[in-house]
Amino acid sequence: MNTKTHFFLAIPISNELKAVYSKWQQSMKNQLPFKSWVHPEDYHITLAFLGDIPKSMLRNISKEMEVIAGKHHSFQLSLNGIGTFGRKESPRIFWAGLEREQKLFDLQMDVYRACKKLGFTLDDRPYNPHMTLARKWSSDDVFPNNLSHIVKGEEKIVSFSVKDFILYQTHLDRTPKYEPLSIFSLKD
């Protein structure tokens, strides 16, 4: 059994938004055959994926994130639209997108810089915030080019308030699989 665990920093999704996307997700499962659909309690917007780190680093990361949270005010985010990562015919990730909000990018950049300063090896690709809905297309059929006949407007704009971000630990043997370890509250 693999005992490796992963850690990441992310913005939690409001309970109201979890309910909206959970209902929509249930209606999509038969129409979009992905290998796995994300449990609604695991919805989040990643700020930094830390990977498998020694538990001794958790205290350092928590102290640094407290400082960063104290420098940022709460803000609104709006989920808007859907998309994929990976091959168009057979995507590896199906996601809900976000309207651009500079405060999110500012927070992510501060988190990213702090993690790099602490010695973490992070993804260097440009930040592309999203909420993962499903993983690994599992059909021999090609993923549909146009989802308008499937989504029927359910992917409309839904806003929520970002008041904190969380250090999560991944448990691959559980559902839901993300455990919140520390919450970092933003200024009001």
Image (cartoon, grey):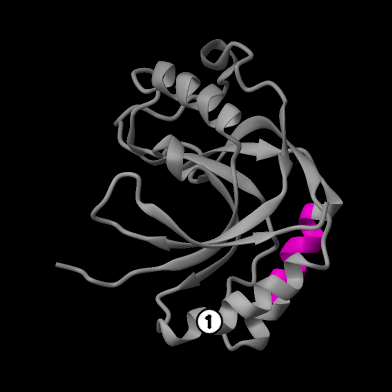
Spot the residue most to the left.
1
Mark 1: few/some/many CA within 10 Å (<14, 14-19, 20+)? few
Residue assigned mark 1: 59
| Front-lying residue, 64 or 37 | 64
Classify residue 181 as left or right of residue 1: right
Seen at 82% across and 46% down, the residue is 101
Seen at 68% across and 71% down, the residue is 66
**Residue 170 to residue 2: above or below:** above
Q: Which residue type does callout 1 highlight?
A: Arg
Q: Is residue 92 visible?
A: no
Quarter of the image holding residue 113? bottom right
| Front-lying residue, 138 or 127 | 127
**Residue 182 to residue 102: above or below:** below
Seen at 30% across and 45% down, the residue is 175
| SS of the residue under disc 1 | helix
Q: Position of residue 36 (x, y in %)?
A: 33, 39
**Residue 88 to residue 115: above or below:** above
Seen at 42% across and 63% down, the residue is 169
**Residue 24 to residue 119: above or below:** above
Q: Please give the range of residues in magenta.
A: 104-112
